[in-house]
Amino acid sequence: MAKRDYYEVLGVSKDASAEEIKKAYRRLARKYHPDVNPDDKSAEEKFKEVKDAFDVLSDSNRRAQYDQFGHAAEEGGFGAGGFGGQGGFQGFGGFEDIFDTFFGGAQRGGRRNGPQRGNDLRYDMEITLEEAAFGLETTVDIPRSETCETCSGSGAKPGTQPETCAHCNGTGQEQVMRNTAFGRFVSVKPCDVCRGEGKIIKERCPDCHGNGQVRRERKIEVKIPGGVDTGSRLRVSGEGEAGLRGGPPGDLYIVLHVRPHEVFKREGNDIIVEMPISFAQATLGTELEVPTLDGKARVKVPEGTQPGTLFRLRGKGIPHLRGYGRGDQHVRVAVKIPKKLSGKQKELVRQYAELAGEEVLPQDKGIINKMKDALGGK
């Protein structure tokens, strides 16, 4: 099923301000949050769609890439920073953190003992320019929380089961009544006995110590498409932290960082490479062998080429992320002037200058004559 446009999802225009996007997200998050719509799968899917749209459009870099590449910048893909580089993680809050922000944790009461989605993970990855251009498949090591296999996530010792909390009757909450000058007020707070879980574990699992989760490192296969750049983000669905009490796992977000290249400079989907040539080559013309991402190529330099002239190699740049062709490679020539010449070489250059009517320093001139010239011949 094709994904809807993120601006359409939030109900804002493409030139909406950051504040307008934030307001639209808050309104829709309140409306579709799973805790507000229990056992409503469609509401949960809409909430996830709204959250995905906000994650992209609230980030200026990801929003710019989305405006340029659409959903191809996020799916499978990109927006959407291993490979011999540094990896780091950052957790993203699940449904609960957002609900607490909007409504306050105490109001959720007994919903704490329901299924909870696992947190998302972030992994920063460094890749080469060649890998960014043509893509690659590799594996990354991801440390994460997983459901304990010994107790199947219950937290109880095998052969036993968590017991319903007698204090709150399994609701995970208790009522507190206060008498004030304005009357009697009843508030709800998490149960002090079971800490809001609704269950009590008398014999804890020896592997997870009652947490229902264990910390493990997993190898995750990752496919990077060609055409990505620094800041592109790959989402690997379901490879984040494990959910609680049967909740779905979070997602893994891989953020890419492209290392600077020694020869090539990237400008969008084009590649720039600078090639030095001599004065004679620029004057009389030559043919250069230049490096490209695909190997060697030859460029014909006509006579009279000026410093900084660009020669284009069509289709030798970075592949477009959506798969529609490639950028170009531009070869910029830099004319190198020799710093030291032999006597014969100098004489030949002077002869050329005379034929061209150009003034140069005389070959032999004493310091006195030079001073006279500087003083206007006096």
Image: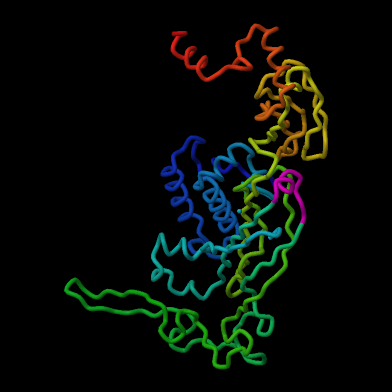
Residue 298's spot in the image, x, y percent?
Answer: 83, 29
Left or right placement of residue 338 versus residue 118 in this view: right
Image coordinates for residue 305, horizontal then vertical, percent: 71, 18
The quarter of the picture where residue 168 lies is bottom left
300 vs 56, nearest the viewer: 300
Residue 280 is left or right of residue 110, and the answer is right
Query: Overall secondary structure of the magenta stretch?
Result: helix
Measured along the vertical axis of the image, is residue 16 above or below residue 74?
A: above
Res 334 seen here: no
Residue 106 magenta-drawn? Answer: no
Q: Is residue 138 above or below residue 8?
A: below
Quadrant location of the C terminus in the rendered image: top left
**Residue closest to the eye, 325 or 71:** 325
Q: Residue at x 62, y 48 (%)?
A: 232
- Residue 192 can be seen, yes or no: yes
Rendered image quadrant of residue 118: bottom right
Q: Bounds of the magenta span? A: 128-137
Q: Is residue 376 left or right of residue 1?
A: left
Residue lying at 67% horizontally and 30% vertically, measured from the top left: 340
| Percent x, y of residue 251 | 62, 61
Q: Quadrant of residue 333?
A: top right
Q: Is residue 4 above or below residue 104?
A: above
Q: Position of residue 178 (x, y in %)?
A: 26, 78
